[in-house]
Amino acid sequence: MSTASLITLAGYSREKLEYLIKMAAEFEKHPNRKILEGKVAATLFFEPSTRTRLSFETAANRLGARVIGFADPKITSGTKGEILKDTIMMVSNYADVIIMRHFLEGAALYASEVSPVPIINAGDGANQHPSQTMLDLYTIYQSQGTLDNLNIYLVGDLKYGRTVHSLLAAMRHFNPYFHFIAPDELAMPEPYRKYCDENGIRYVEHKDFNADTIADADILYMTRVQKERFSDLLEYEKVKDEYLLKKEMLTKVRSNMKILHPLPRVNEIEYSIDDTSHAYYFQQARNGLYARQALICDALGITLEDIRNDKTIIL
Ligand code: CP
């Protein structure tokens, strides 16, 4: 087992999160380097992805590592019956770090328990998405100048949304005030509300989604209703269009308010909002590159000091 794996940010201290943000900031200044020359990163994606896989692969490539892997498990020997443990053991023969997305909750933890090389969880079912959270923290800090004492509104699919589950835990050090806006069917699950209670995280729940409800938001974090997580598609049809952010709803918002979305969006944010000063989701996705460069380096034992002293920058 490798102790450098990243499965969840829940156990990370405030200092560690701030340290990773500083690392990401170094990579934003200079994303192109050879600090990982000679290393191989494997991306094993058992579930579809655009941003997470491509930004991890870009992160590794821009740091001089080479990348192997698959974006579709149908082309692997998993279709012949190979179990996850054997796949991980094989890939760890070839790669220095394994970045894995899997449809099963707990799959990344399991992989980390059998793998001799670090595993980075790129999303496990409806459970956690820590690299998304790292880029979310970086983005919130970048857009607000602080992570402390913010009003963070989470909107949409709070039941299955692993990005919001990850964000809750990581924000506990920063005294947030969360507003959970969701229909009953997609409300924040009880274990996460209990987690908030036990960790002194303030929250309030709403069903209404209008200009008044969001007027005090610093961060408005929209999420997609995830069709792929529903066993009953009729249930999906009932809730899929309930929380669409319309431009006319921005009339009362704070000037500093930024709209985030892990993307892909389907029908959660009107396209006309893209040109407003509140839209920040494309910058957020861009930050995924820098945050993931930081996470890969951290998993491989490269420190902030190493990065600051790095002489391999390509201008
Ligand atoms: N935010 C996110 O996880 O996007 P992808 O599913 O495209 O990787």
Image (cartoon, rainbow, N blue to C red):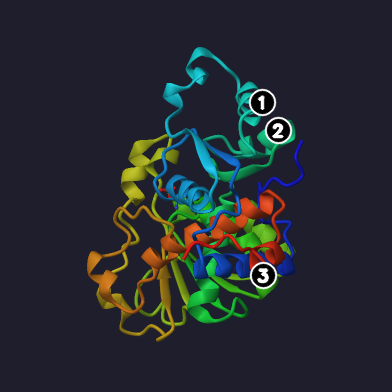
Q: Amino acid at mark 2?
A: Ser
Residue 98 — which label? none
- Outermost residue toward the top in this view: 80
Q: To which residue does mark 3 refer?
A: 18
Residue 90 locus on image (x, y percent): 63, 24
The Cα atoms of the two marked residues, 1 and 2, are separated by: 6 Å
Going from N to C along the chain, the mark reached first, 1 or 3, is 3
At a point 39% along the width and 55% down the height, the residue shown is: 263
Q: Which residue is mark 2?
A: 115
- Residue in the foreground of this view, choosing between 219 and 36: 36
Question: Going by the image, does 55 lie left or right of 141?
Answer: left
Local secondary structure at mark 1? helix
Q: Nearer the viewer, residue 94 or 108?
A: 94
**In the rendered structure, are the residues bearing label 1 and label 2 in contact, judged by CB atoms less than 8 Å apart?**
yes
Q: Residue at x 35, y 85 (%)?
A: 252
The amino acid type found where label 3 is placed reads Glu
The three-letter amino acid code for the residue at tag 1 is Met
CB of mark 3 near ligand 1 (< 8 Å): no
Mark 2 surroundings: few (<14), some (14-19) or many (≥20) residues within 10 A: many
**Disc on the earlier residue, 2 or 3:** 3
Q: Quadrant of residue 203?
A: bottom right
Residue 89's label in the rendered image is 1
Q: Residue at x 28, y 69 (%)?
A: 274
First reached walking from the N terminus: tag 1 or tag 2: 1
Distance from Cα at disc 1 to Cα at disc 3: 33 Å
- Residue 297 at least partly seen: yes
